[in-house]
Image (tube, helix red, strand yellow):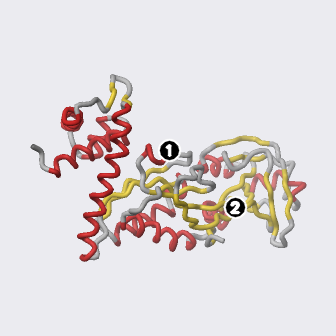
Amino acid sequence: MSKPLDRLTLLQTFVRIADAGSISAAARDLGLSQPSASRQLAELEARLKTQLVRRNTHSMSLTRSGTELLAESRALLESWDALEEKHLASEGQIVGALKLVAPVALGQLELARIAWRFQLAHPGVSLDWLLDDQPIRFSELGCDCWIKVGEIPDDTLVVRDLGRVERLLVGSTGFIESSGAPGTPKAAAAMPLLGLTPFEGGKIPLENANGRSSTISPPLKMRTNNIVALKEAALLGLGMAVLPRWFVDAELRDGSLANVLPGWRAPALSIRAAYLPGRYRPRRLRAFVDALEKEVPEIPGIAAPD
């Protein structure tokens, strides 16, 4: 008969296979050979006398039994984490794995620095750091925390506000000189716009320091879902773009980008952290979200939440 640890290992391998979407990818994540991961999956199916995964040469999917077992396995592994943390708490250690999803640009730069500092402070924590600007299926991905700019389109999650992202209407110095500095929102409405989906559509609301508001509908020159590509297009002079101040701070200082409408701002966007509800949250997750709440508002161009 297998020891309890062996059973946990089989469940951990199964969960990683389900999350990774393939046995080979899960094997790489776990430091196993593909045949070893396959044998563990086959042993689990044999013990439970049911098929968990349908696989062919092109794809892999969970059976109904596999889908049910995935949720049950996560609960069992979570209980083991709670037990492990309980006995390590007296030693003051924060240990274990965290799977995190962050927005691409912010996750490459400022948020990555927060994450790496967290790991330096807690060397017993391992991070799976994924970057994605698109909505995710939280439970299917099996992540612990989702950091997102804008709305969290899942009301089943617990959401914590981390800060407010200041945004400016910017363009290259050459673009502004050739187009003529607009001076007013009405004049800016005639200038070509580079849009970032899903935030910029046909209309851009603006507000000045006195609380006066104006909505403009400039002609859309180009649209992209990638903020890095958007900044490159703006730097090349293709048009003006709404970009977060933290992301263009260096370019504003060196003069390669300039504020198209000084004194006016696009609406700030909230940056939030979301995680699954439940009676148990790992200590490492609590500590990481606390670190985000403390450090995100310290990023230039991001203010504390309202």
In the rendered image, the residue lying farthest to the top is: 57
Query: Sequence-wise, which precedes: disc 2 or disc 1?
Result: 1
The amino acid sitting under disc 1 is Arg
Check disc 1: other Cα within 10 Å, few if <14, some if 14-19, many if 20+.
few
The quadrant in which the N terminus is found is top left
Seen in the image, is 40 located left or right of residue 151? left
Which quadrant of the view contains residue 281?
Answer: bottom left
The x and y percentages for residue 61 are 38, 31
Per the image, the residue denoted by label 2 is 167
Residue at point 64%, 66% (across, down): 164
Seen in the image, is 156 located left or right of residue 34? right
The x and y percentages for residue 71 are 37, 45
Q: Which mark is residue 137?
A: 1
The amino acid sitting under disc 2 is Arg
From the viewer's perspective, is residue 198 above or below residue 91?
Answer: above
Look at the numbered disc 1 and give the secondary structure of its residue.
loop
The quadrant in which the C terminus is found is bottom right
The one nearer the camera, 4 or 60, is 4
Mark 2 vs mark 1, CA separation in Å: 28 Å
Look at the numbered disc 2 and give the secondary structure of its residue.
strand
Which quadrant of the view contains residue 166?
Answer: bottom right
Q: Which mark is residue 264?
A: none
Check disc 2: other Cα within 10 Å, few if <14, some if 14-19, many if 20+.
many
Residue at point 25%, 70% (across, down): 88
